[in-house]
Image (cartoon, rainbow, N blue to C red):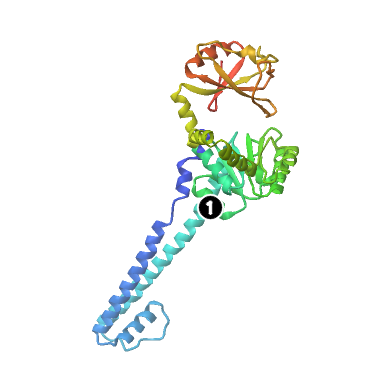
Amino acid sequence: MSDSESLFSTDTIQRSQPGHSRPFRKIMTGIALFFTICLVAVIGYVSAGWKLEDSIYMVIITIFGVGYGEVQPIESSGLRALTIMVIIAGYGAVIYTIGGFMQMVIDGELNRALGARRMTKEIERLNGHTIICGVGRMGSILAKSLYAAKKPFVVVDCDERRLKAAEDQGYWVINGDASEEYVLEQAGIRRASVLATVLSADATNVFVTITAREMNPDVMIIARGENPKTEKKLLGCGANRVVLPTAIGASKVAQLIMRPTMENMLEQLTSEGAITDELGHFGLQFEELQVTAGSTFVNKTLDKIEVRSDRGFLVVAIRRADGEVEQNLASDTLLLEGDAVIVLVHSNDIPHLSEKFAAKGIKITYRGVTAEL
């Protein structure tokens, strides 16, 4: 079983479902049985000529063993048998009810302990996963997207209410301060490929970034920044990318004001991953070409990778090895080792692209799957 499969296994789903229904039914059955015994005993004493209040009092002191003595002398064998039945059955119903309650308490604690142990074991087996620090509004949306894409991840937060909601969704969670080394160690920071710190406080995101970078120099850190001035600090502390939600939101509003038609079209295309489907209707799709060591395209310009076909392809952007993205590219833009070339290409031209780059030592990555050509 892969890491992503184990992340969303049935054990996780079962952990979020109620596990105390059987003890609860046992408690309700015991209570119902207790009151039935009391009712039958009261009717028996009343039938023997006792007053109703004396009958109820006799049943109570008999079941709970108070030891006040009989309300009236019990001389007949029938009343003695009834009293014996009340003592045995009443005690049995009480013990049965208490046993159900204790089982519910013990099962709940045991399930929580076993669930935490199982979660720890699963997290220890994760490799190349994502660590989400903070499961507020932004963190919840991020976790939901990764969950839908079946990407393994661990959520770290101090808020027990948020963690409970995240665990009910089937996520792996860790309760703790993400800026503490032992918490990140539990989350598998040394095996993680990405850490996203999306906490609401910029200072906390800075501390998390510093700690994570010291523990894993190779992990990609994506940090959230509320104040634009924090961006430089986060990058200086080791973050690879900084996301400014306020700036992104303001830019979106500006585009809606200045270019409403274009923005509406893009919103329709990108909603719920529809852009891939929409492009597919036109026979188009995105491809990512990774320039690897030994490739003949290293230190060559873009015009060297042009593919002449009936329709050609469009170089959208280049992501440099340091994470910088370049757009609006000129034909003399230089390719370097470790660059990723993102192109928009017709589906029918993909075999031609593969043949073109197969002998050049370039890997093609599409939708997270990398193939050596």
Residue 126 x, y percent position in the rendering: 58, 37
Residue 208 x, y percent position in the rendering: 69, 44
Which residue occupies the foreground of this view, 247 or 210? 247
Q: Is residue 149 visible?
A: no
Q: Is residue 260 visible?
A: yes
Which residue occupies the foreground of this view, 199 or 177? 199
Mark 1 Cα within 10 Å, few/some/many (few <14, many 20+)? some
Based on the displayed image, in which of its 4 quarters is residue 58 positioned?
A: bottom left
Callout 1, which amino acid?
Lys
Vertical placement of 335 versus 274: above or below?
above
In this image, 106 relative to 74: left or right?
A: right
Residue 122 x, y percent position in the rendering: 55, 41
Quadrant of the frame with the C terminus: top right
Residue 203 x, y percent position in the rendering: 72, 48
Under circle 1, the secondary element is: helix
Residue at 64%, 25% (x, y): give it. Answer: 327
Based on the displayed image, in which of its 4 quarters is residue 332 positioned?
A: top right
Vertical placement of 19 versus 42: above or below?
above
Residue at 47%, 40% (x, y): give it. Answer: 9
Which residue occupies the foreground of this view, 79 or 102? 102
Residue for badge 1: 164
Residue at 68%, 19% (x, y): give it. Answer: 337
Vertical placement of 73 versus 104: above or below?
below
In this image, 192 relative to 311: left or right?
A: right
